Image (cartoon, rainbow, N blue to C red):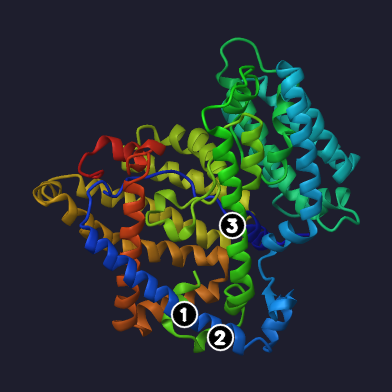
C-alpha cells in the first residue's frame, strides 16, 4: 500500500486558485535583459558543476547505492532512480500505457470518421474495457459502486449533499482502515495495481462529484448514468487525470463538427516533439545530477555549498487533443513561478477546485473573511485529496497562508498612498521593484514546496542555510540571481500571446485593480 506522503510525491500536488497579478507589461531595456541572462546562466553553470561533482564523487555512499541504479552503460553513468513517478512511467508502466493509448487513438480515429455522433460511447466502452483487462472485475465493481452512489445523490439536486457524499467517498480511499480494506480487494500480482487503484478511484470520485454538481445546475431533467460512464472511463484521463469538469467534457465530446483549426496538427506534432525533448533533457539530468538522491543523505547535504542547495530545486494531453478535446494546459515548471496564485502542478484539479469551492465560496474575492474561508475550505479538500499526514498538514498551512498573505498585500498596495506612489513611477521601475518582492516570494514558494518534493528535514536545512547561516552573502547572492530569473520569466510572459497578463486565466484581482496589473 502506498504511504500517503509517497502518494503526495506521486501526484505532484495541486496548488489551487489564481490570485493577483504582478505587473509584467512594461518593457525593460534590451541590455538590461542581456545582463540578467548572463548572470543567471553563469550562476546555473557554476552551481550545476558543483552538483555534478558531488554526484560523481559520492556515488559509493550508502544512500546513493539504494537509489542510484544502472543507467547508460555506454556512457558509464548510473541513473538517479529516486523519482518513483518517473521510473514508473518510463519502465514498468511504459509498455502498458503505450499499448493502451495506441489502441485508443486507433479506435477513436476510426469511429470519429464513421460515426462521430457515437464517438463518446466508443471512448467510454474502450476505456472501460481497458480498465477491466488491466485491473479485473473487482476493481471495476468498486469504481462502478462509487459512480452509482454519487449518481443517485446527483438526482436529488442538492449541492451540499453531493459534496458530503463525494468527500466521504474520497475519505474512504484516503483514510485507514477503509483504504486498506478496499485496496486488499483489488490488488494482485500486477506491480502497479496499488498505484492504479488510488489513481483510478481518486480521479473517478472527483469526476463523479463534478457530474453531480453540474447536474444540480441543470434546470430541466437530469444527465443520464451513461453520460457519467462515458465521462469517467475516458481512458487518457482515467488513472492519472487531468480532470476536465463534466460541463466542458460533455460539450466537447458531443460536438459532431470535427474540424481541425489551421495548423492544428502541426501544433500537436510540435508539442509532442517538445515533450519528447523535455523527457530526454530530464533523463540527462537524472544520469549526471543526482538532485533527488542527494537530499536523502543529510550528512552530505550539510557539506554542500549554499549555491549547490539553491540549484537543486504532456503525452496524455496530446492524445486528448487528437480526440478533438481541449484538455487543461500542462503544469508550469516550478522555476517559472513567482506568485502563490499560480503554484498548481495539476491545472485540472485547480480548475475543479476553483469552480466548485474557491469561487463558489469566495464570490467576487473582495472580502477578506470570505477569501480566507474560501482558501481554507479549498486547502482542506486538497489535504484530503493528497492523503492526510503531518507533512501534508504543514504544506497546506503554509501554502494557504502564503496565498492569503499575497492577496492581502495586493489589496494594500492597490490603496492610496501606495497606489498613488506607484502611479508616479515609470512602468519599468515599477516592474523592477515588484520583481524584488517576487524574488523573495519565489524562495518562499520553493521552501514551502520542498516539503512535498523532498522532506521536512531537508526544507529546514535549506531554510537555515539560505536565510540564517548564509546571511548576508549567500542570501543576497541567491536573491540577486533569482531576481534575474524572475525578470526573464516576466519578459517571456510579456511577449506571450496572452499579452503578459495572468488575469485572463481567471484572476479577478488583475481585472479589478489597475494598480495591481501594470
Q: Looking at the picture, how far across and down is residue 318, in whole percent?
A: 63, 41
- In this rendering, would 515 be left or right of 336? left
Q: Quadrant of residue 513?
A: top left
- Mark 1 touches mark 2? (CB < 8 Å): yes
Viewer-nearest of discs 3 and 2? 3
- In this rendering, would 493 be left or right of 171? left
* Above or below 241: residue 340: below
Q: Residues within 10 Å of mark 2 (few under 14, many from 20)?
A: many
**Residue at left offset 69%, top offset 29%:** 231
Mark before the other along the chain sequence, 3 or 2: 2
**Residue at left offset 71%, top offset 18%:** 116
* Above or below 204: residue 422: below
Q: Looking at the picture, how far across and down is residue 113, in whole percent?
A: 73, 21
Badge 1 element: helix
Q: Residues within 10 Å of mark 1 (few under 14, many from 20)?
A: many
Q: Quadrant of residue 158?
A: top right
Nearest the viewer among 170 and 68 is: 68
**Residue at left offset 44%, top offset 41%:** 374
Q: CA distance from mark 3 to mark 2?
A: 26 Å
Disc number at residue 308? 1
Q: CA distance from mark 3 to mark 1?
A: 25 Å
Disc number at residue 277? 3
| Residue at numbered disc 2 | 54
- Residue 200: tell me if it is visible: yes
Q: Looking at the picture, how far across and down is residue 153, in whole percent?
A: 69, 25
Residue sitting at the far top: 220
Q: Quadrant of residue 169?
A: top right
Amino acid at each position: 500500500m502506498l504511504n500517503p506522503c509517497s502518494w503526495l510525491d506521486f501526484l505532484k500536488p495541486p496548488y489551487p486558485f489564481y490570485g493577483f497579478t504582478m505587473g509584467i507589461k512594461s518593457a525593460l531595456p534590451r541590455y538590461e535583459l542581456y545582463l540578467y541572462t548572463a548572470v543567471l546562466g553563469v550562476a546555473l553553470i557554476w552551481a550545476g558543476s558543483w552538483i555534478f561533482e558531488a554526484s560523481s564523487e559520492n556515488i559509493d555512499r550508502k544512500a546513493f547505492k539504494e537509489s542510484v541504479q544502472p543507467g547508460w552503460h555506454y556512457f558509464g553513468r548510473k541513473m538517479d532512480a529516486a523519482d518513483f513517478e518517473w521510473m514508473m512511467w518510463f519502465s514498468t508502466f511504459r509498455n502498458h500505457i503505450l499499448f493502451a493509448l495506441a489502441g485508443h487513438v486507433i479506435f477513436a480515429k476510426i469511429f470519429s470518421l464513421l460515426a462521430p455522433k457515437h464517438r463518446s460511447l466508443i471512448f467510454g466502452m474502450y476505456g472501460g474495457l481497458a480498465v477491466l483487462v488491466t485491473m479485473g472485475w473487482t476493481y471495476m465493481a468498486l469504481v462502478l459502486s462509487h459512480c452509482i452512489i454519487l449518481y443517485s445523490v446527483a438526482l436529488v439536486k442538492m449541492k451540499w449533499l453531493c459534496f458530503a457524499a463525494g468527500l466521504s467517498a474520497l475519505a474512504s480511499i484516503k483514510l485507514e482502515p477503509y483504504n486498506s480494506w478496499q485496496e486488499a480487494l483489488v490488488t494482485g500480482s500486477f506491480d502497479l495495481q496499488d498505484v492504479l487503484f488510488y489513481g483510478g478511484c481518486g480521479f473517478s470520485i472527483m469526476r463523479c462529484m463534478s457530474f453531480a454538481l453540474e447536474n444540480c445546475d441543470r434546470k430541466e431533467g437530469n444527465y443520464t448514468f451513461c453520460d457519467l460512464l462515458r465521462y469517467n472511463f475516458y481512458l487518457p484521463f482515467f488513472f492519472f487525470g487531468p480532470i476536465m469538469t463534466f460541463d466542458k467534457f460533455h460539450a466537447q465530446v458531443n460536438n459532431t463538427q470535427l474540424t481541425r483549426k489551421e495548423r492544428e496538427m502541426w501544433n500537436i506534432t510540435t508539442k509532442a516533439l517538445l515533450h519528447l525533448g523535455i523527457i530526454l533533457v530530464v533523463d540527462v539530468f537524472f544520469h549526471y545530477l543526482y538532485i533527488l538522491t542527494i537530499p536523502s543523505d543529510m550528512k552530505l547535504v550539510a557539506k554542500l555549498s549554499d549555491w549547490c542547495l539553491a540549484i537543486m530545486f504532456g503525452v496524455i494531453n496530446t492524445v486528448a487533443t487528437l480526440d478533438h478535446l481541449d484538455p487543461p494546459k500542462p503544469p508550469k515548471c516550478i522555476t517559472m513561478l513567482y506568485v502563490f496564485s499560480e503554484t498548481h502542478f495539476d491545472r485540472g484539479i485547480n480548475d475543479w477546485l476553483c469552480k466548485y469551492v474557491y469561487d463558489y465560496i469566495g464570490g467576487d474575492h473582495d472580502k477578506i473573511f470570505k477569501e480566507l474561508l474560501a482558501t481554507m475550505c479549498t486547502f482542506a479538500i486538497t489535504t484530503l485529496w493528497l492523503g492526510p499526514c503531518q507533512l501534508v498538514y504543514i504544506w497546506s498551512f503554509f501554502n494557504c497562508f502564503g496565498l492569503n498573505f499575497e492577496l492581502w498585500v495586493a489589496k494594500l498596495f492597490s490603496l492610496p498612498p501606495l497606489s498613488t506612489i506607484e502611479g508616479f513611477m515609470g512602468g519599468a521601475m515599477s516592474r523592477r521593484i515588484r520583481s524584488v518582492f517576487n524574488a523573495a516570494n519565489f524562495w518562499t514558494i520553493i521552501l514551502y514546496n520542498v516539503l512535498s518534493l523532498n522532506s521536512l528535514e531537508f526544507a529546514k536545512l535549506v531554510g537555515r542555510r539560505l536565510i540564517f547561516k548564509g546571511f548576508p552573502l549567500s542570501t543576497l547572492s541567491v536573491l540577486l540571481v533569482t531576481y534575474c530569473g524572475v525578470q526573464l520569466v516576466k519578459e517571456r510572459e510579456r511577449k506571450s500571446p496572452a499579452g503578459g497578463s495572468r488575469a485572463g486565466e481567471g484572476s479577478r484581482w488583475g481585472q479589478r485593480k489597475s494598480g495591481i496589473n501594470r
